[in-house]
Amino acid sequence: MPGLPQCLQLFDILQIGLDEYDFLLRKVQIQTQGKRTQWQKP
């Protein structure tokens, strides 16, 4: 099955992307602490 390794590689890239997105989201949350923004949950 030649398509399987590509699928797993794509999943790895997606997982890394999600990790980086989570990191950036936390970074933005830290930078916007103390400010009232629409992104903060009530």
Image (spheres, grey):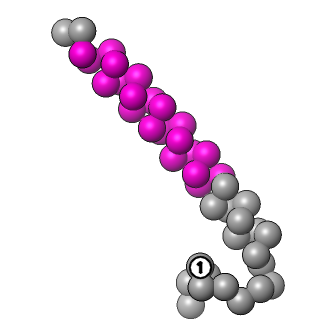
Residue 2 within the magenta-colored segment of the rendering: no
Q: Name the residue under label 1.
A: 39
Give percent across and percent down for residue 4.
Answer: 26, 17
Give percent across and percent down for residue 19.
Answer: 57, 45
Residue drawn at (19%, 9%) of the image: 1
Image quadrant in which you'd find residue 14: top left
Residue span colored magenta: 3-23
Residue drawn at (45%, 30%) of the image: 12
Q: How crowded is mark 1: few (under 14 residues within 10 Å), some or many (20 or more)?
A: few
Give the vertical position of 6 relative to 18 (above or below).
above
Give percent across and percent down for residue 28.
Answer: 71, 65
Q: Give the residue furthest to the front.
A: 38
Q: Give the residue furthest to the left.
A: 1
Q: Could you tell whether 10 is left or right of 17 in the image?
A: left
Give the vertical position of 8 relative to 23 (above or below).
above
Q: Could you tell whether 37 is left or right of 30 in the image?
A: left
Residue 8 within the magenta-colored segment of the rendering: yes
Q: Could you tell whether 1 is left or right of 32 in the image?
A: left
Image quadrant in which you'd find residue 31: bottom right
Q: Is the magenta stretch mostly helix, strand or loop?
A: helix
Q: Could you tell whether 16 is left or right of 24 in the image?
A: left
* Badge 1 element: loop
